[in-house]
Amino acid sequence: MMKSLGSIRRSFAPWADPASKPFISVRNVTKKFGDFTAVDDLSLNIYTREFFALLGASGCGKSTLLRMLAGFEQPTSGEIILDGQNLAGIPPYRRPVNMMFQSYALFPHMTVENNIAFGLKQDGMPKADIAERVAQMLKLVKLEKFSQRKPHQLSGGQRQRVALARSLAKRPKVLLLDEPLGALDKKLREETQFELMDLQQELGLTFVIVTHDQEEAMTMADRIAVMSHGKVVQVATPAEIYEAPNSRFVADFIGDVNLFDGTVTSAEGGSVRIETTGGIPLRMASAEKPANGAKAAVAIRPEKIRISRQPPAHAPINAAEGEIWDIGYLGDMTVFHVRLKDGKVVKASALNAVRAVEDPLGYDQQVWVSFGEDAGVVLKD
Amino acid sequence: MEKWSRFNIASVVLGFGFLYLPIVLLVIFSFNESKLVTVWAGFSTKWYSQLWHNQGLLDAAWVTIRVGLLSATCATVLGTLAALALVRYSRFRGRVLFSGMVYAPLVMPEVITGLSLLLLFVAIGFDRGFWTITLAHITFTMCFVAVVVQSRLLSFDQSIEEAALDLGATPVRTFFAITLPVIAPAVFSGWVLAFTLSLDDLVISSFTTGPGATTLPMKIYSQVRLGVTPEINAICTILIGIVALGVVVASIVTKRREVQRERDERAAIAAIG
Amino acid sequence: MAKLSSALASRLVIIVPYAWLLFFFLIPFFIVLRISLSQTTVAMPPYTPVFDLAGGLAGILDKVREFSVDNYVWLTEDALYFNAYVSSLVIASISTILTLLIGYPIAYGMAKAPPAIRPTLLMMVILPFWTSFLIRVYAWIAILKPEGLLNQFLIAIGVIDQPLIILNTNSAIYIGIVYSYLPFMVLPIYSALEKMDHSLIEAAQDLGCTPIRAFWRVTFPLSLPGVVAGCLLVFIPAVGEFVIPDLLGGSETLMIGKTLWSEFNSNRDWPVSSAVAIILLMILVVPIVYFQNVQAKADSEGR
């Protein structure tokens, strides 16, 4: 019996164990293209069997980092260690890593079978072994019937699977995936995400994926590195990134967020009081103790904000009055934009747990928005 | 989609009439009974049979074909290398000069190219004849090959080369296993272009030739200077026929391949559904 | 070892064509320049030796001292050459404008043609380019002759009663150049127009442009790169054209390509013809460099 994914995942956290050795170690790597710094003094550790995501907007340096791992670019300074081996100066064709390309990069003049066998032939593997391995890979990606097709005779999803099979055929120590699902439509993309996760568990490989799609990264990855301007802003599990972002940038980049800027008025006993620039007194649970008078921001996710017609019991703390400015009905939930007295617009979302609500909230209604002390995160500026 | 207006149809039809009418007239008068090429005097193929007895003409044709085959082949190798250098290496010492030397021959007046090559051959003491014509043709046709191959390389998805490197193929192997097969059609059309340019060339050949090496255009030119005759029309018609046949066959082959490809794609889409 | 051979291979990709072009394209120009500065002698080859390395550095210096600009002085003294340059430029300019005026509507009509027949039209424009230049020019002789087909036709339909004298005039040269170079004008304009998004015209019309104004405000400016490339592709070789003025222009026409040819082949004056070539090259250097920039820009956009 295969262990369920959940039970493996739950116990998998080598990064938290100081005794475990990283499999890939990126040390102070900088990459410059002329005057432009694509990757800026970046350090990262990735562990065996980890599904690691590099997440960021286009131009943040994530693809450059991936291409340095593959060997298509050489770091301007710093080093990359893979399984104890320094990769400096090793060309792509001598590295024990393989890459799945965003465009799939299938060889247009070769059949599916020959595409998958290409890497094995370069290693001089005996013919019989190649045939066996190719058959195995075709089975893995469920393309047995298509072995004699050329790439242009396949659908987008099938091409994606050929690209995957080709990059896995050599059993690389690390599989690099550059926006592997970018060209698929939404539905196929979601299916494939889970297929990829199962495959990674089954083969026991280390995956490093580059994506700009936060949902994709959150769904698949054990850990995510959020990147911006060539630097890693935060490396953490998806839940930590979402619930405990370490900066305004991460809070804003991942999901929707309301940011309240203000000044710390007191900090004691595990809670911080902040007066927002709009005059709302906030009290937030926080392990840290910022100094009085320090600038701070509170980040609160829309689904953690309540909307009510009556003021909540804890008002005026963590509560504010406003009117409904916009309503977006998304089916599974409804998003409200509430305009506060000071003009600030707060986003709040409510799950549509029942099919019809009696007396639903409408435009221009006066409402209160409120939230609990543990709903938000205090971010230092 | 807007419709094809009368004005547009008229410009295309008149334009093509202008392009083709002189050639059509030339072909028609090659079958003229009379020695005049302006007065029709009945159908005859006598000028064609006369060609077979003109030994000078046949010799010239043979020289032309040999020069064409040899120079087109060398020009294709050099031109493909030049295209690779231009597309793949965005930075190397003297790149500006190099790209200048690739583009300049495309527009350089032939009299200048011809004269300068002749003076080079004289300066290094190279005996002029078949080989000097061939070297000269390689030089100016390789630039046309480079431009054709270059445009193919620019639209080429470079990640397929990276994929090959990633899967363990050395750069040299990647070139022969991946790059060359993919750009092969462009390389082939580069060869055909180089070959026809070599067949056509009069000015550069005239400058760089020596005793004993007369090409067909040189032969035609010397006869044209003496006057217009149906015999020249007949040679021209044969040359036009060869070129037209080649182009038509090539386009039918490409068309077939495209149709096949479309059918395959449709089959692939049907297979998913 | 494999790494070494790969590095070597990537060097060779550059070095081989580079060396070829240096030797067969660039160096010959310096030889032309050198010879244009030497004295005409009666000996064969008809000029004094280029470089005599046996003489060492001093020998080279002696040679440099022997350089003379006599040939250039000679060119300026004889009005024939000056007139030939000017008339070449004038003829090439007029022909380029005529080619543009005729070629643009053809390219435009092709770009507006139903997509299904566009590849065929494109092939038909390229096809004459594959047939010999010499043959295409030759074909016009029979048409333009006083007793030629054009005059026969015009007299037959009663437009004229005396044959027009076209052959051996500048008009014949214009016709020859327009005819021979038309594909070079049509192709770049067509590819610029064909790339253009038709919704741009719809947007312009939606915003209140009449079709004619939409053409001048949107279509034409966007096709300018094609127009520029086409004009350069016609103008530059036309200036130095030899076959067309020789076969269609007759003995009266002055074009520098023809002058150079006869200076070289009939008078066998190599130094003077070298000087003629050098001046022609200097005249054309500006448009050629401009053409290269246009090409390089188009390449970097295609990247």
Image (tube, coloured by chain):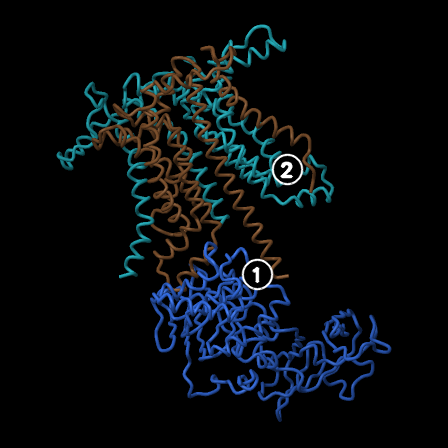
Chain letter, colour blue:
A
Which residue extends farthest bottom? A269
Q: Can you see residue B192?
A: yes
Residue carrying label 1: A156
Q: Secondary structure at mark 1?
A: helix
Quadrant location of residue B200?
top left
Residue A327 vs A282, above or below: the answer is above
Q: In this image, C116 relative to B140: left or right?
A: right
Q: Quadrant of the C terminus of chain A?
A: bottom right
Chain letter, colour cyan:
C
Q: Can you see residue C83?
A: no
* Residue type beneath disc 1: Gly
Q: Where does the image place residue A49, in percent across and percent down from the top left?
A: 47, 79
Q: Secondary structure at mark 2?
A: helix
Residue toward you, B267 or C214: B267
Real-space Cα separation, disc 1 to disc 2, in angstroms: 32 Å
Q: Residue at x 57, y 60 (%)?
A: A156
Query: Which disc is residue C125 wearing?
Result: none
Residue toward you, B179 or B90: B179
Q: Residue at x 70, y 44 (%)?
A: C202
Quadrant location of residue A190?
bottom right
Quadrant location of residue B230?
top left
Chain letter, colour brown:
B
Residue carrying label 2: C112
Mark 1 vs mark 2: in front: 1
Q: Where does the image place residue C298, in percent across and percent down from the top left?
A: 49, 44
Q: Residue at x 66, y 75 (%)?
A: A257
Q: Residue at x 47, y 12 (%)?
A: B33
Residue toward you, A307 or A19: A19
Chain under numbered label 2: C
